[in-house]
Amino acid sequence: MSDKIAYSREGDIAILTVRNPPVNALSHAVRQGLSDGMDQAEADDGVRAVLIVGEGRAFFAGADITEFGKPPLEPHLPDLINRIEASPLLVVASMHGVSLGGGLEVALGCHYRISVPSAKVGLPEVHLGLIPGAGGTQRLPRLTGVEAALDVMTTGRHIGAGKAHELGIIDVIKDGDPKANGIAYARQLLEEGVSRRPVSEMDPPAPIDWDAAFDTILAKGRGQISPAWCVRAVQAAVEKPFAEGLKAERQIFYDLMQTDQRQGMIHSFFSERAVGNLPELKDVNPRGIQHIGVIGGGTMGAGIATAALLAGLEVTMLEMSAEAGQAARDRIERNLSGAVKRGRITPKQHDQILTHTLVVVTNYDKLQDVDLVIEAVFEDMEVKKKVFAELDRVCKPGAILASNTSYLNIDEIAATTSRPSDVLGLHFFSPAHVMKLLEVVVGDKTAPDVTATGFALGKMLGKISVRAGVCDGFIGNRILATYRTAADQMILDGASPYEIDNALEDFGFAMGPFAVADLAGLDIGWAVRKRKRAEGNVPKRDATYADTLCEQGHFGQKTGKGYYDYAAGPKARVPNPDVLPMIEADRARLGITPRAFTHEEIVRRYMAAMVNESAKVVGEGIARRPLDVDMTLLFGYGFPRYRGGPLKWADIVGLEPLLNDIKSYAAEDPDFWAPAPLLEQLVAENKTFDDLNKKG
Ligand code: T1G
């Protein structure tokens, strides 16, 4: 038997203990070991029951995702689970940690299930572009009914043991050691003389309106298809005999395994874990962080302080006056009340944080004990330099000085201090206590342990941290500026902001670029355009309609009008009738005869610009790998997860056609559409961006 499964006996109970760290993934060796273990138990004289239990952190985390895309090896998981269920012995699962995907499916193939109170179960296959593929769509509805089963599968969320017990997934909840629990439970069942209880022999649940459910869930998926296909698999569970239903599930699973969406989502799964693993930080110890300072209590500063407070850190917030300090405290209080509403913290913790863990001061000298300080003041280099001079004066040796700037030069800021190696950028995204992306911007002189501390802080705050080099806009905002310019150029040539938003929302973005701009505030883009014009950086055809909109005081949702008119509420998406005449005036001024754009062309141009700039960002070393750009766009800019990010998407659609598009657009504007050298190199070498990811 494989070394992944240990066989032992407790009287008439055989125990199969799974040992496949870190999370007991159901690899080929584990599947083979379970199969051999069942054979051994059935051949072992005197054995009347089998206990399956995991060692380490989990029962099972599910099928081994690293095996996806490779030829599947027998025993296939569905067959193994059927084999377990068909055993003449009583089979008991004792669960702890997580039982996810195939892990829960193994438990469902057992006859009885016990778990510790802290255990969680789930069928998260939709997060991988799949559906449960080892009987979960057939067995779970027989225990919980159709609605509850579809909710578990289509959301992919983890369910606590209590809820799972309520739903009938878990039979008994008992604190203590999972193996001891399992043995005692199996013994009790044997003494009670209960019979085997194969879930597959239970009656199927009542049907629902399958087409309506499919359509509703498909619409919610914003282009992602696997959640809706759970409906069809459950429909087969209700309408067909178990064996036929299993075949239907397997076919849907296999078809989804071939999709680009499965490729994109598996790429996202592994990349969000890989992005924080930097070889250059291996064996580099971060500095200790317990008490941080935040300079500036505006939206960003209050959000950063909230994220740190929710992570259990002490926070000293500095504002310029008592009134500003109180306003900052009020913002933080509102954020924390939201966390209470979401069940993230209790009302008692809310009060505790505000009375003890958060201190608001107006004097820099109060920052002398902080381990790390983040400035989040006005985006002006002179203002920031003054702040850093003060921080350099008061903060203890070894304290890390970070800027939340979204584009200013970290090296220039660092040079104003006596400790440039202790300076880095920590670029949060608004709202900072909600958005998961954190760009860790590493300056020329930033010490490795300071970078490592930036990543350690990100992990403490539950962020996806991406290492960024120093340039205007770092990774995300630099790429955003390019694809937004491509959108503006399409508007000058004839497209409308509303067509572009619709095209990109059909592509899978939660919101198109103009709806996003209205949400973030049009004054932000206006300030960037003014800065770039002052630096002489003006697009060949300068769209001024957006400035006109801002000059009239229309900054988007916060002023009630922007590209859209929000009188009927943000969801109404009513175009602002003043916008198209401004665009027509721009076209007339530039002598442009507008032409029509299809959704397909809008997406191709928009994505070509995004991929081209992303390739430049990787080629220049601003982002370490293509997956770093993918994770930045996924976690900071709403890029659809099932496409894996712009560079994964590019690999899937093919780099050569993309490069050909870019070269054809370059005829209109050779500077803006200059092909990225890295993209040309990969096409010439017939390589993909993913090949660069593998180099690490
Ligand atoms: N297969 C292979 N490796 C896995 C894995 C898996 N299922 N789950 C985690 N890992 C690796 C992960 O890459 C990381 O590796 C390490 O374990 C720790 O993970 C037929 C087909 C279990 C909640 O989708 O949700 O079953 O980076 O850093 O934060 O129907 O991992 O250390 O080298 O995430 O404590 C369904 C996916 C599969 C669960 C633990 N199961 N995993 O979180 O640690 S499809 C899932 C998770 C399936 C069947 C179908 C989480 C976790 P490394 P981690 P964590």
Image: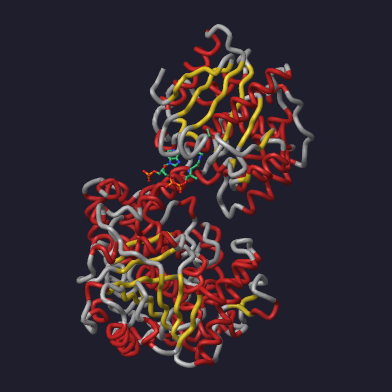
| Residue 535 visible to the viewer | no
Count all numbered tags in the image, as a single digit. Answer: 0
Viewer-nearest residue: 507 or 146: 146
Tell me which corner region of the image, top left, top right, bottom left or bottom right, holds residue 579. bottom right
Residue 282, how many percent across, how many down?
26, 52
Viewer-nearest residue: 404 or 57: 57
Viewer-nearest residue: 529 or 300: 300
Residue 572, how many percent across, how many down?
67, 72
Q: Residue at x 50, y 69 (%)?
A: 309
Residue 141, how many percent across, how many down?
70, 35
Q: Residue at x 24, y 60 (%)?
A: 619
In the rendered structure, the answer to whether residue 544 lies left or right of residue 469 reads right
Q: Residue at x 69, y 39 (%)?
A: 165
Q: Residue at x 34, y 57 (%)?
A: 628
Tell me which corner region of the image, top left, top right, bottom left or bottom right, holds residue 200. top right
In the rendered structure, the answer to whether residue 429 lies left or right of residue 133 reads left
Q: Is residue 676 above or below residue 10?
A: below
Residue 30, how many percent across, how many down?
44, 26
User: How has the structure been colored for display?
Assistant: secondary structure
Q: Is residue 235 above or below residue 677?
A: above
